[in-house]
Amino acid sequence: MKVLVSGGAGYIGSHTVVQLAEAGHEPVIVDNFSNSKPTVIDRVEQIIGHHVTWYRADLTDRAVTERIFLRERPDAVIHFAGFKAVGESVAEPLKYYENNLNTTFSLIHGMQASGCRLFAFSSSATVYGMAPLPFTEEETDLSALSPYGYTKLAGERILTDIAAATDIRVALLRYFNPVGAHPSGLIGENPLGIPNNLMPAIANVATGRQDMLHVFGNDYPTPDGTCVRDYLHVVDLADAHIAAVEWLSEHDVATRIWNLGTGRGTSVLELVHAFERACGHKLPVEFAPRRPGDRDAYWASAERARDELGWVAKRSVDDMCADTWHCQQGNPDGFPNGEPASQPSQA
Ligand code: NAD
Ligand code: UDP
């Protein structure tokens, strides 16, 4: 299949492009590099060993998006493009609603203009809000705790309605906590900036960019008192997208939801200790007050993805830490600035 990957230069998108190419599909990257470096294209091409088609375009621009669809005529879309920082979404909600929703609308218009019928959407476990565990795909009591979360809830709803009214088939993919990097060390989470999430913060402490890891809360009702999440390796997550798009191509459904996680919880301190094994030294840790809005513990119910997609997350927490560390060491100053060697396609 030819698969248009929106946000294909980003963290999860770049890994998905690599896995798509390695599975024999043809990825087409569309990205405006608002949160990624164009040189990621070089890295992707280095891993897969050949040129990848890419466009520099803002997917909120419907006319440009439609032109790309008419030129490429993809069989499927995987939609990663969007903003994802929870705190920033509270401060700048309009920016989040506009970008995360308008990219979705443009892509649907592009699909309708070109006859593309398969759509995979990056959703998040955040839509489970305060629902009770286990988080299963049948849960109806969904909610959001931030404008970012509402863009995911709204995206799910909008796509469900569109799928019901058209011949477009939609996969709603609810990610738990993606971490790690490609084992080559060539792509990973952009290691620059002040991270909000745990794994990049741990990595910053390991490299010395941050002198101390602040652990938000050690009095939760969990085995060691710190919060528990379901971390999954980004390469496993990338593979799940391929399984989902292939499944959609074979099943006449409007919408299907899958949780993407390991089904296992890991505490903040367990992740710290796994990272210490990967980097070979102790990491300075200080307990800090709870972070507002944090739930104590949750993980995926991962059975549906296993049973229907034949997908299970294979890589361990130690793999996630080792690959993150490898990528950090190879890119101590982040990914290089500048333009990729290969030329973009013109919309
Ligand atoms: P990312 O920021 O690394 O990647 C997103 C990419 O989209 C970036 O390359 C950015 O430049 C691009 N982009 C943003 N707006 C665009 C626009 N208008 N036009 C074209 N390109 C645009 O983020 P990521 O971690 O790879 O996340 C991908 C998706 O998965 C996002 O939708 C995010 O909300 C969702 N998600 C991520 C996580 C996570 O922990 N990383 C968890 C759940 C869901
Ligand atoms: N966390 C922490 N210190 C940090 C960043 C995160 O203790 O510097 C904790 C956070 O409170 C949460 C867990 O790590 O309990 C995972 O946080 P992250 O933001 O990565 O994921 P989310 O909570 O959004 O699932």
Image (spheres, rainbow, N blue to C red):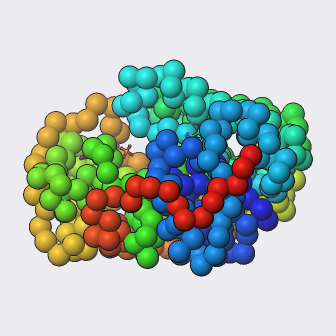
Q: Is 71 situated above or below 327? A: above
* Residue 206 position within the rendered picture, expressed as x and y whole percent measured from the top left: 19, 62
* Residue 103 position within the rendered picture, expressed as x and y whole percent measured from the top left: 65, 36
Q: For the N terminus, which image quadrant?
A: bottom right
Residue at x 28%, y 31% (from the top left corner): 292
User: Which residue is more in the foreground, 213 or 292?
Assistant: 213
Residue at x 65%, y 66% (from the top left corner): 52
Does residue 225 appear to the left or right of 331 in the view shown?
left
* Residue 274 position within the rendered picture, expressed as x and y whole percent measured from the top left: 26, 69
Where is residue 102, by image quadrant? top right
* Residue 160 position within the rendered picture, expressed as x and y whole percent measured from the top left: 74, 36
Q: How many marks?
A: 0
Q: Is 73 situated above or below 63? A: below
Residue at x 47%, y 39% (from the top left corner): 84
User: Which residue is more in the foreground, 176 or 7?
Assistant: 7
User: Which residue is more in the foreground, 195 or 298?
Assistant: 195
Where is residue 168, by image quadrant? top right
Is residue 141 among what the camera can see? no
User: Which residue is more in the foreground, 53 or 60?
Assistant: 53
Where is residue 2, by image quadrant? bottom right
Residue at x 19%, y 42% (from the top left corner): 217
Is residue 26 among what the camera can see? yes
